[in-house]
Image: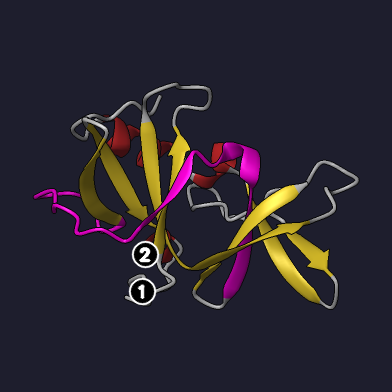
Amino acid sequence: MLVLTFQIGDDRLALDARRVKEVVPRVPLQGVGGGPPWLAGVFIYRGRVVPVLDLHRLAGAGDCPPHLSSRIILVPHPPGAADAFLGLLAAGVSDLRRLDAPAHPPLSLAAPGQPDLGPVLADGGTSVRLLDLDRLLPAPVREQLAALPGGTVP
């Protein structure tokens, strides 16, 4: 499968490119007063408010570093939505590559109620975590997102 790779703390992650709508530069974000700590802010994309999750904060790896390679990955959310998006703030977003799909259904590696960054897969001599957006966000996070301006997460 074709994947987009990026960094979250010390972990290298991959996201199925079919789930990516667009990768945009790290634009200035508007804060959301009283928002959860993993919410980097919101921005307007084609007339829509898009909440942006800082994947570093969500994973407990501090703030996303302000590198030139830090980007916002736009994904339709909920899956299949034509005009509702979620932004994922990550560092080192720059590489599209082929990755063998796991032969067996991957198991969850996350503790209950914690973000699930996905299973660890072999990629040559290194490892990569295959991010599954459907498993990433625990129920409390999905509920908080749904309450944000423009929130559409079920």
Number of other residues with Cα within 10 Å of mark 1, as a class: few under 14, some 14 to 19, many 20 or more: some
Q: Residue at x 84, y 49 (%)?
A: 102
Q: In which quarter of the image is residue 67?
A: bottom left
Compare residues 108 and 81 and report the one nearer the observer.
81
Cα distance in 3D space between marks 2 and 1: 5 Å
Can you tell which mark lies on residue 62?
Answer: 1
Compare residues 35 and 15 and report the one nearer the observer.
15
Left or right relative to 149: residue 142 = right
Whether 21 is drawn above or below 120: the answer is: above
Whether 5 is drawn above or below 146: the answer is: below
Whether 65 is drawn above or below 154: the answer is: below
Compare residues 102 and 5 and report the one nearer the observer.
5
What is the three-letter code of the residue carrying label 1? Answer: Gly
Number of other residues with Cα within 10 Å of mark 2, as a class: few under 14, some 14 to 19, many 20 or more: some
Q: Quadrant of residue 43?
A: top left
Left or right relative to 30: residue 26 = right
**Can you give x and y, in whole percent of width and height, for residue 3 in the image?**
68, 52
**Does label 2 or label 1 sit earlier along the sequence?**
2
Q: How many marks?
A: 2
Compare residues 124 and 114 and report the one nearer the observer.
124
Whether 97 is drawn above or below 108: the answer is: below
Q: Which residue is drawn at 57% across and 52% down?
A: 116
Q: Is mark 2 on a helix, strand or loop?
A: helix
**Can you give x and y, in whole percent of width and height, for residue 143 in the image?**
33, 33
2 and 1 marks in contact (CB < 8 Å) = yes
Q: Quadrant of residue 98?
A: bottom right
Q: What's drawn in magenta, residue-wise?
A: 11-38
**Residue matched to label 2:** 57
